[in-house]
Structure formats: structure tokens, C-alpha cells
Image (spheres, rainbow, N blue to C red):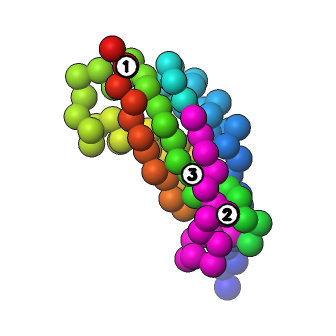
Amino acid sequence: MLLTAAPQPVHAVRIEAQLRARLSSTHLEVIDESALHAGHAGANAQGFGSHFRVRIASPAFAGKSRVARHRLVYDALQNFIDEGLHALAIEIIDTP
């Protein structure tokens, strides 16, 4: 019988560091909204580390469609998704 570990909570500071490193963000807010989703499928027992909102601006987004911008963020955070990040709301901030 194969045992799988329960998803572990992800910490906002780790998400922030990774997005800064991979996308050279010029504006970044990482907000843990997990407590708002208590009891929801995908929420963990700890009450943090499963649902996040990211507000981000990056030169990497220049000339890309909304879908392509979101894909860059998802790709940058794939390891966290694999670790148990259940939901990610992405707000792209356009900078002049």
C-alpha cells in the first residue's frame, strides 16, 4: 500500500522570495487567505498555507497576454503547488 503525505502548509515568505527571484518583480504582495477558506475542500487543518492572493508587477510580463502572464506565475510556483498550495488568485499590476 502506497502512503501519501498530507499537503503541508506553504509560507507566504517563501512564495514572495521565489517570485522575486524568478520574475524580478517590481511590486509584490503575497496574502495568505487560507483562514477565509476553513472547511473548504483543499483547506488544511493548520488554517494557513493553502490559499493565496498574489498582486504582482514584473518586466517579464511586458507584451504578454493575461493568460501568458498568469502562466509565468504558475510556472514560477509549481513546486509550491506540488507541496500543497491549493488555490492561487493572481492580480497582475500594470506599471507604466
- Residue 35, labelled with which disc? 2
Q: Is residue 42 left or right of residue 75?
A: right
Q: Are marks 2 and 1 in contact (CB under 8 Å)?
A: no
86 in relation to 74, above or below: below
In percent of the image, x 33 and y 35: which residue is there? 69
Q: Secondary structure at mark 1?
A: loop
Q: Are marks 1 and 3 in contact (CB under 8 Å)?
A: no
Q: What is the crowding at mark 3: few (fewer than 14 residues within 10 Å), some, or many (at least 20)?
A: many
Q: Which residues, given as a range, are shown in magenta? A: 29-44
Quadrant showing the N terminus: bottom right
Q: Nearer the viewer, residue 43 or 76?
A: 43
| Circle 1 or circle 3, nearest the eye | 1
- Residue 19, magenta (yes or no): no
Residue 2 percent across, percent down from the top left = 66, 79
Q: Label 2, label 1: how many angstroms apart (C-alpha)? A: 30 Å
> On the image, numbered disc 3 is attached to which residue?
52
Q: Decide if residue 50 is in sight here.
A: no
- Residue 95, labelled with which disc? 1
Residue type at mark 3 is Phe
Residue 26 percent across, percent down from the top left = 50, 19
